């Protein structure tokens, strides 16, 4: 079993060399006091916590899982104790408002910290992870009283939060949800209904759990326009802010799952539970998007986490595992065989994992800068950043989870038969990774959001700020490695967008037929831009004689691999995008059985 080691050097390169976070933070009034020294100290402390506390209970947590009895959930051994250490160290409050007990550091720094905890132990990280979405939602849409009552305790970590959307009869289609909210005389509401697949809906790690719940008011219009949002605490809150009597919300059961077994996935029953309206009536789905967008970037991070963990495990194993001789001559002549890392196909798998893990880290960090700008609050800058983030979020969520699962599988393949047994932890990594393509909107849902709701409905305007940025980069760096290939993909993306748009005018099914391939094409393109930038930055460092030449050389060679072996996947995707809907829709529904 290989222990998790936080990729501090790569994180520092991504933040401070590739994306110049220090200058970025100094340009924002809210975060101008944050420098690289402060950030690195925080990252180093986070690495210690993740390596020494969270990593060691990842496999044991999977083996033990959560247990449910009489509505109460017990988390695996060590989880509660790790969470208490996490709270005592102040980790939940890093990037939240100082007015409510936060440290006021940039959200992007919090994202970098969360990547470490997620890679070390994704199941554990889901408990505080859901809380961040609850905090952002209450902060954006709650009243001052709600912020003082709930936000302060969530930021401190003494309470945790959930997102309660899905019901037994509806998953993504929230317009048909049935949970009801009946007004009480005291201004609160009685919430009644059942929610399923609620991550961290019940557990023993915190003093209270604050559920953010979608429900319908009695006079609500049908569909998504009739959904409101409510705060429903596990324990009602006393006037002095302490947890009081148990609310009428209970965990009916927990799911028995393929992976993330140490994260409690709950069926939650609301039996007239006392809740409080957050945001305007019948505008709950709009408010919930604050939570959902946070969760989508968090899930994108899961793809990076599983790619990184699989890469670390398989790299260590392939350096030690002896099997066969190299085709070009013995590389370990004094041993009975060569380490399998010398074989080209093993190197293909390792480099794919490395390219996706490091490229995914770059993409999340790029999005993190946009999140900072939005949070800083300057109206014009925030609008521009939010538009670019709106375009990139479905790409990050769907592409990185698909690529992360591919990487986790490749990690398992590197181990051969040993990867299929539990001892090494790579089969757990594959199982844990699989859910990321499903929750917070499946790959297909994200693809429809990207191509249909955003790109085509805006007539391509939403993608232009990013594609223009790439175009300017290519123009400024003509002749540099990989720039010509990147420019061609950028141009082709525009052509494909126009092609699908014209077909969709005649047949709306063309959007659904092209959407997933279009999203994956977009993901390879976006990551290609970041790898081209990384290669240039690394070459500049080498030319200037800065230290760590082995690191920079490896960065350039990984970029070379990406452009030689990964970006060409766009050529096949272009063909399937242009193939259209005909071959998908021509068969009658009842003919599938034959």
Image (tube, rainbow, N blue to C red):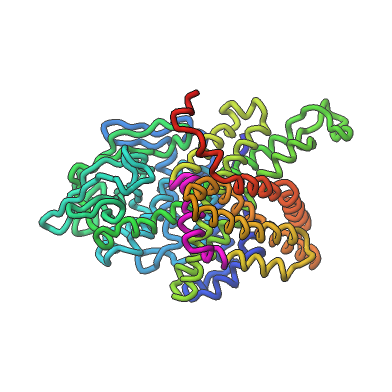
- Provide residue 488's location: percent of width, then percent of height: 71, 59
- The foreground one among 105 and 509 is 509
Q: Where, by quadrant of the figure, is residue 583 drawn?
A: top right
- Provide residue 428's location: percent of width, then percent of height: 54, 34
Examine the structure image and report whether residue 445 is included in the region drawn in magenta. yes
- Provide residue 392's location: percent of width, then percent of height: 53, 58
Would residue 382 be found to the left or right of residue 420 on screen? left
Q: Which residue corresponds to the image point at 70% horizontal and 41% vertical from the top-left?
A: 350
Q: Is residue 401 visible?
A: no
Does 60 appear above or below 229? above
Q: Which residue corresponds to the image point at 79% horizontal and 37% vertical from the top-left?
A: 342
Q: Where, by quadrant of the figure, is residue 140 drawn?
A: bottom left
- Provide residue 241's location: percent of width, then percent of height: 24, 58
Provide the residue span drawn in magenta.
Answer: 440-465
Would residue 67 be found to the left or right of residue 409 on screen? left
Does 594 appear above or below 209? above
- The foreground one among 95 and 378 is 378
């Amino acid at each position: 079993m290989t222990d998790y080691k936080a990729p501090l050097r790569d994180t520092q390169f991504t933040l401070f060399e590739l994306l110049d976070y220090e200058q970025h933070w100094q340009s924002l009034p809210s975060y101008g006091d944050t420098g690289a020294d402060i950030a690195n100290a925080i990252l180093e402390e986070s690495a210690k916590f993740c390596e020494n506390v969270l990593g060691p209970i990842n496999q044991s947590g999977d083996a033990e899982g959560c247990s449910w009895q009489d509505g109460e959930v017990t988390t695996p051994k060590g989880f509660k104790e790790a969470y208490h250490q996490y709270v005592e160290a102040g980790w939940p409050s890093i990037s939240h408002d100082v007015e409510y007990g936060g440290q006021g550091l940039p959200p992007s720094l919090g994202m970098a910290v969360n990547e470490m905890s997620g890679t070390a132990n994704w199941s554990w990280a889901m408990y505080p992870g859901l809380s961040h979405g609850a905090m952002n939602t209450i902060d954006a849409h709650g009243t001052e009283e709600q912020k003082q009552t709930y936000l302060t305790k969530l930021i401190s970590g003494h309470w945790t939060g959930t997102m309660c959307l899905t019901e037994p009869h509806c998953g993504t289609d929230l317009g048909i949800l049935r949970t009801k909210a009946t007004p009480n005389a005291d201004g609160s509401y009685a919430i009644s209904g059942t929610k399923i697949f609620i991550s961290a809906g019940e557990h023993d790690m915190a003093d209270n759990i604050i559920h953010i719940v979608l429900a319908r008011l009695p006079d609500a219009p049908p569909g998504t326009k009739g959904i409101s949002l409510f705060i429903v605490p596990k324990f009602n809150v006393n006037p002095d802010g302490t947890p009081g009597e148990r609310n009428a919300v209970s965990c009916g059961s927990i799911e028995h799952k393929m992976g993330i077994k140490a994260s409690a996935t709950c069926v939650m029953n609301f039996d007239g539970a006392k809740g409080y309206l957050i945001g305007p009536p019948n505008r709950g789905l709009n408010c919930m998007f604050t939570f959902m967008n946070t969760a989508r970037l968090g899930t994108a991070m899961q793809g990076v986490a599983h790619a990184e963990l699989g890469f670390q495990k398989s790299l260590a194993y392939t350096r030690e595992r002896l099997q066969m001789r190299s085709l070009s001559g013995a590389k370990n002549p004094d041993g009975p065989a060569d380490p399998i890392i010398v074989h080209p196909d093993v190197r293909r798998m390792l480099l794919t994992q490395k390219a996706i893990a490091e490229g995914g880290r770059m993409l999340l960090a790029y999005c993190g800068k946009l999140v900072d700008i939005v949070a800083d609050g300057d109206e014009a800058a925030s609008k521009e950043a939010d538009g670019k983030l709106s375009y990139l979020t479905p790409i990050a969520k769907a592409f990185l989870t698909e690529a992360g699962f591919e990487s986790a599988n490749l990690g398992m393949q590197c181990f051969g038969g040993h990867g299929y047994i539990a001892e090494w932890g790579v089969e757990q990594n594959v199982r844990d990774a699989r859910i990321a393509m499903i929750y917070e909107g499946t790959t297909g849902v994200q693809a429809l959001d990207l191509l249909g709701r955003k790109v085509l409905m805006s007539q391509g305007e939403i993608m232009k700020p990013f594609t223009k940025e790439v175009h300017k980069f290519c123009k400024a760096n003509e002749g540099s490695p990989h720039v010509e290939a990147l420019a061609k993909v950028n141009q082709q993306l525009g052509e494909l967008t126009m092609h699908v748009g014209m077909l969709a005018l005649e047949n709306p099914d063309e959007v659904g037929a092209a959407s997933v391939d279009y999203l994956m094409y977009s993901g390879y393109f976006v990551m290609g831009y970041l790898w081209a930038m990384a290669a240039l930055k690394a070459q500049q460092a080498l030319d200037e004689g800065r230290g760590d030449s082995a690191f920079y050389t490896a960065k350039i060679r990984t970029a070379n691999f990406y452009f030689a072996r990964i970006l060409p996947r766009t050529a096949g995707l272009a063909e399937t995008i242009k193939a259209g809907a005909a071959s998908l829709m021509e068969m009658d529904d009842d003919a599938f059985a034959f």
